[in-house]
Amino acid sequence: MIRTSFPAASPPTPKRPEPATRWQILSLPFFLFLTLPLVALFLRISPTRLITHLNQTQVLQAITLSLTTTLVSALVILVFGTPVAYSLARSRMPFRRFVDAIIDLPTVLPPAVAGVALLMAFGRRGLFGGLLEQLDIHIAFTPIAVMMAQTFIAAPFYIKSAAIGFSSIDSELEQAAELDGASNWQVFRYVTIPLSWSSLLGGILMSWARALGEFGATIIFAGNYPGRTQTMPLAIYIGFEIDLDVALTLSVILVGFSFLALVVIKGILHRETF
């Protein structure tokens, strides 16, 4: 009988570990550069002083105005930005790249330029100023101007996120709903929105956080009037010159709101991925 011998199986060669430690060390300086100023901000003001300054009228007015105007701006962006996002994702409109560039422009435009542009369009001597005066409508240096500045600067964040969410949906699912007799609105409501809700929610939270921190366009188009147009970023600007503790208090609050929004967004994206 012939015996056939097979060579003994060699143990698998262990994979070479990724040099993660090396990259972590290289990334540490820039991570510290981003982290240390925020840590210094929180260390600069004690909890007692923070609570004390929260009771000041100027601080409460700035917080209330910021939250009110940004919530209205976010709602406006959601209502009017959704059709724009859907058009970008689905329709083959002419000059699509040009339209896409115009929508992205406020994200790279200096905020001060955005404020001047809004003033030249809707101010008393602006492009539509005469018509608005005839209708007894005053926009510049009012809370309406605050919300318009916030909407102008923050809308692209929602539109781009929503467009990505809409374009990621398999069109066959929507076509199947149409074959079952669903109208266009029913398809959008019961198929498109549920499948893209994470992109819509993440985008509107990003827009809200960006509107909350808007400064340049607001101070030029709406001014800096306490209790009327002075949002938290504008109050920080004045507080830095008059009362540093007020500026620190509002800065800590803004960081907290922004960080909370990012935590929610990251949580949504993580749940969608896994």
Image (cartoon, grey):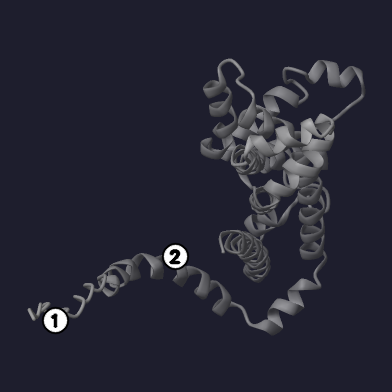
> In the displayed structure, does residue 260 sit left or right of residue 147?
left
Give the number of the mark in front: 1 or 2: 1
How many residues crowd mark 2 within 10 Å: few (<14), some (14–19), many (20+)?
A: few
Residue placed most toward the observer, 137 or 200: 200
Q: Quick check: can you spot residue 125?
A: yes
- Which of disc 2 and disc 1 is earlier in sequence? 1
The image's mark for residue 34 is 2
Residue placed most toward the observer, 70 or 230: 70
The percent coordinates of residue 274 (x first, y second) are 57, 64
Q: Residue furthest front?
A: 1
Residue placed most toward the observer, 7 or 234: 7
Please give the name of the residue rendered at 61% of the width and 61% of the height, measured from the top-left corner.
262
Q: Which residue is mark 1?
A: 8
Q: Quick check: can you spot residue 140?
A: no
Please give the name of the residue rendered at 26% of the width and 70% of the height, measured from the top-left corner.
18
The percent coordinates of residue 70 (x first, y second) are 76, 50
Q: Amino acid at mark 2?
A: Leu
Which quarter of the figure has residue 136? top right
> In the displayed structure, does residue 109 sit left or right of residue 222?
left
